[in-house]
Image (spheres, rainbow, N blue to C red):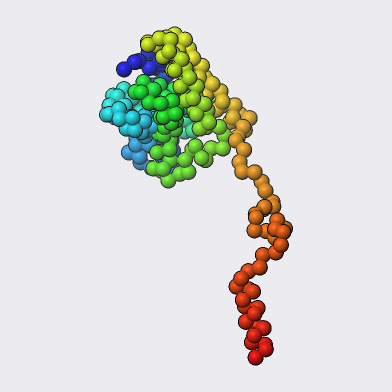
Amino acid sequence: MEELALESNAFFMGIEYLAVFCSGLMGGLCAVRKNYDLFAMLITAWLTALGGGIIRDVMLGSLPPVGISDRGFVLTALVSGLAIAVIHPEVDKLRWSMLTIDALAVGLFAVNGTSKALDLGTSGMTAVFMGMFTALGGGLVRDMLLNDVPMIIRDKHLYAVPSAVGCVLTVFVCRGGAMEDAGVSTAEVVLDCAIVVLVVVMRLLSVKFSIMLPGAVKRHNTYLPSESRYLKRPVIHPDAHDGGDDDKDQSRD
């Protein structure tokens, strides 16, 4: 099995640990806001940080999942749950800092999840879905556990879209790198980093300038084939016609 591009660099492995920690803080903060106990904070922190990777690994058959087998990631997620129990007022105030770290986590998880799926021999389309599960699955499980509308639906700003863009671009980068060299090249690492930056920029710009995807087209008139103005002759309902004949027969009697 080939080494993933971002995991081949110690600096970006450190950033990934930071992303896991900050994702756990965001998850634990949701439990704090609902006045749940410490155990709930630990669970929501762990699920938010590593739930997406667990879903990905289970679906890919890569067992046991990283979310329960990687000691460093698991401990980092649990420590974030303990930390949020103490520093939740400060974390709640650092909106833009946490938003940036959250976007960074989405970008890193999207790239790593897609790369791992491709490394295990999946198709490009499957890899894109696996990357999105890795990036968004933890938050989805957390919101379902806390009985909230999932963030990917609740947040009207660009959230899932940047991760999808990152996953698609990662497929092209990995496919191109596989054609040129069997190992991890410097160009592939640079391109993967550029994809992460792009995901972060898309997310932050959408929040800063309220960039949202359009919704349903507003319509005030309906155009159905059954409407009389679209028919050459009016519709005669058989039941009504039969009823009219019966009335005439009764009147003759």
| Left or right position of 223 against 100 | right
Vertical relation: 118 (above or below) 139:
above
Determine the image quadrant of residue 174: top left
Task: Give 69 or 101, whichever is nearer the viewer.
Answer: 69
In this orientation, does residue 241 appear? yes
Identify which residue is drawn at 63% across, 30% down: 209
Task: Give 188 or 37, whichever is nearer the viewer.
Answer: 188
| Left or right position of 241 against 46 | right
Residue at the bottom extreme of this rendering: 253
Vertical relation: 245 (above or below) 174:
below
Task: Give 129 or 241, whichever is nearer the viewer.
Answer: 241
Q: Where does residue 225 sit, x and y in percent of width and height?
A: 65, 55
In this orientation, does residue 81 appear? no
Quarter of the figure that contains the N terminus: top left
Q: Where does residue 149 sit, x and y in percent of width and height?
A: 48, 43
The number of numbered discs placed on residues in the rendered structure image is 0
Task: Give 234 or 161, whichever is nearer the viewer.
Answer: 234
Identify which residue is drawn at 56% across, 23% down: 201
Q: Where does residue 16 sit, x and y in percent of width and height?
A: 40, 21
Identify which residue is drawn at 65% across, 91% down: 253
Q: Where does residue 43 sit, x and y in percent of width and height?
A: 34, 36
Identify which residue is drawn at 59% across, 26% down: 205
Determine the image quadrant of residue 61: top left
